Image (cartoon, grey):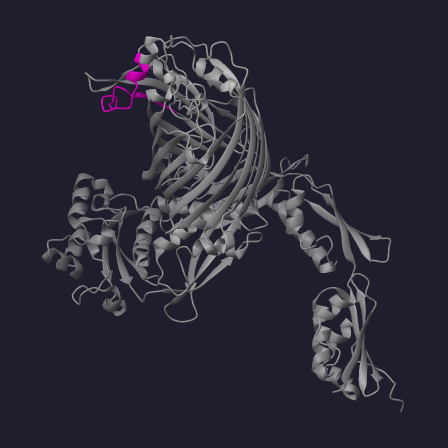
Amino acid sequence: MNQSASILAGLSVIALLLMPRSGLISQIEQFEGRTIKSISVEGNENMSREDILDLIQMRQGARLSGDLANGDLKTLFNSGSFAYIAFHADSSGDGVDIKIIVQERSRVEEIEFRGLDELNRQEITEAIPLKENEVFTERKLSESVSILIRKYREKGLFNAVVKTKTVNIEGPENLIKVIFIVDEGENIKISKINLIGIRSLDPEDILAVLELEEEGFISDGTFKEAVFEKDKETIIEFYRSRGYLDAELEEARWDIRWSNPVEQEERVIVVNYKVREGEQYFYGGYDVTWDEKFLHPEQTGQPPGDKALFTKDQIEEYFEYTDSSVGDVFDNAKFQRDRGIINYLYSQQGFIFARVIPERTIIVLSKAAIEEKRNDARQVAAAANGDDYFNLERLAELLEDNPEYEGRKIVHTRFVIAEGDKGFIESIIIKGNKKTLDKVIRREINLLLQEGELFDADKVQRARELVFNLGFFKEVNIDARPGSSEGQMNLIIDVNEQPTGTISLGGGYGTLTGFSIFTEVSENNLNGTGQRLSGRVEFGPLRTSLEASWTEPWMFDVPWSLTLSGFYSHRQVQAPSINIANEEELSTYDQDSVGVSIGVGHRFWVNWGHYHRFSPTFSVAANPSSMVDDSVYLLVDQGWQVRNMLTNGLYYDNRDNIFNTTTGQRFEFSVDLVGSILGGADHYIRYYPQYSFYWWPMDFTLFNLIRKNVLRRWRIVFEHRTSMTFTQQTGPVYGAQDKSINPYVEVQDRLYIGGYESLRGWNLFDIYYPSAWRLGGSHRILYGTELRIPVEPSLFWLVMFFDAGALYHDSSQFLIGDTTPQSTITALKQAELNIQNFNMSYFRYSWGFGFRLQIPILPLRIYLAKRLLWDSERRWFRDHPGTDGFEFVFGIGDRRF
């Protein structure tokens, strides 16, 4: 028999799937153990020979075996790139030549959508498994159609039809074009939501908390199945918050019907919820005890007589329900928060596995039931210590004062705590990030948490805040799950990414810059690395600018940042008048500036950081108006000048959410060194101590005025903000500079006060200011406090505020000569920073109210503000004379001090 006879060592994919492994091996017994002399590939068009060989284990010089051939055949098939695969073996001396015969699947050259109006094309392209420049399979096509149909159902388009068409593209590459032909169908709206079985509550209150709404003047009536499922839970949650603990949905369904069965022209959706309410329950009190089988005093560090980690009193002080709440409607949401606070207290100490088991006792309120409970062993034991276990005295008092309460069901809850063992972090697992690299999230987590250390709920919460404050995610959730052994647990960091790249067109407003429009291109998470890249062009009647910057927040994966930036700006600067009479006319001049900046920063101890930035700037002033004073003319005469500035700063920041803060504080102290040893035309040092503090006194639901939000709990927030700026004039180190010709502190470097950014209700050059303030100051103190009441936290807040501010002068920074009016000299001296001027009467104040409207690209701030003065005799504030009404204040963004 001729040894050149060949044998088929691999068959088609069908044969591969059906043939037992032993059958495949038996066909190559003739070549078993021989050395592979060569490997060739036949039939490939899009995938190169080298790419195919990279997928398999066979190599020239290796020994052929059945396991090797079978494994490589499966590997190539599982790659999804081939419709047919076969191995062909030919004898070659004492070795064997392998030929791999393939038939490639088609590749998708282009995907086209026709009729896609209601869905976002980019989002759909990302959601479907069929991708351009990838292999085409019928499975991918079918799954893509299913995803499109599901997306339409989520939009309320239940009649959407999706057909597909594939078109071969001429050429040797076996490429195709896939066309999705969409008929979106009619948009069927909700015409009616029926609540069946409602006896005790107002159906309108229930309808108000549902997200699904009937079509009407305000609501578009869109139906979404996911929202329908969520609303089922909302109904039960609402009932249980009203004391109906046994409430349940007997039926929940939706139907598509003809709006008019006779004419059959329009179809609508009717939603039905059938509720079984059950009885209403009322709060009767708490007790806290421990299951001694799960106490571990050796882990808690407590003495033998105090086995539990906490005392009963320590836990009860965190409860929302108190003894005075006995007899109130039982709010299950409040009960769940009270139960959850026990778990949280233990998890702060590492006892993540602690369990809190509620044991309920139901008392049907009556004199007989009260007397019966007096003989309960727990009541007797508590009475011996002067306590009232079941709060019977309070219940008896309620019954006596309100006989109609008889028969009410009172719920008394006993929390049994099983402390368990301490939990240690075994692994930190990150999921949900498609674009953001794991290390970008992990490095924030590792600032606080490391694998192998004791679980700490406070650290976990702060780590979640750090990740959220990156600004890359809509949601950041952290879950703890049991690990591979007892006492071990895994932290699951689940993120939901949001777009971080924007191309935006918007508007802005500033007291010094006026109205402007801008175009901004930015990417805050460049290629998922966390790098920030942005460019901005702004144009307005008072300001035109061009800016670009790049930031690497973690150089070499350590918490050191690098920022490079550059800018050009042309602006019309408002300057002090040549006289200080009380007149509203202002003087102006133009200024062109160009500059660059390089900065580094370092984060340490989680919430601390320091930064350092060098910023050389070149500027020139021109076109002064006729009202400007001599300092502006001197500035214009100097032509182009350079200003070198080195900024050094230290900060502490533990705010929970830097985008919408509700708790925490930020302290920052920075120093600007301008000129002096750095050279340039300006020479001074400026100090900036700043402090902001946020706290919330309570959650609330706007007093239930907005019924849709009755189940939501949002924080009322107080913001307190203080900023001080102090300027110290220095001088040049290299060479000489005539201060009378080229001042060390230019007019544009003076400090001003007024407008939305600093003192709402007062203008920048307000006629009611002390006259020296309108010249610009050397030192400034600002204070502001805001009460923010959320109506819809992501969109709309009501605001009340109080602002205070003062400007101080350093006369040495002004050019005072023989021609300077005596009134100006006197005004400057009266505004010196000294102990006499550091008093309530010297400051200017305002109070007012308004709202914050968070529209994308255009965050509006609109207030009504009233000027105030301090009345030394009454020792309280009074309206400023001549300003009886409120001033309208408008701002865009949060560019406050």
Q: Is residue 58 above or below residue 873?
A: below
Decide if residue 43 is on the left or right side of residue 690. right
Q: Whole-percent x and y of residue 291?
A: 25, 65
Q: Is residue 34 above or below residue 669?
A: below
Residue drawn at x 20%, y 41% as measured from the top left: 403
**Count of numbered circles in the view:** 0
Decide if residue 241 is on the left or right side of residue 266. left
Query: Which of the 4 image quadrants contains residue 378?
Result: bottom left
Q: Is residue 610 above or below residue 718?
A: below
Q: Is residue 223 visible?
A: no
Q: Which residue is situated farthest in the right direction here?
A: 2
Query: Which of the 4 image quadrants contains residue 413?
Result: bottom left
Between 729 and 261, the one nearer to me in the picture: 729
Q: Whole-percent x and y of residue 36?
A: 77, 81
Decide if residue 291 is on the left or right side of residue 516. left
**Magenta extent:** 826-849
Residue drawn at x 17%, y 46% as measured from the top left: 394
Q: Is residue 160 above or below residue 62?
A: above
Q: Whole-percent x and y of residue 24?
A: 75, 82
Q: Which residue is situated farthest in the bottom direction here?
A: 1
Q: Is residue 441 visible?
A: yes
Q: Whole-percent x and y of residue 55?
A: 70, 69
Between 532 and 314, the one nearer to me in the picture: 532
Task: State yes or no: residue 895 in magenta.
Answer: no
Decide if residue 162 is on the left or right side of residue 354. right
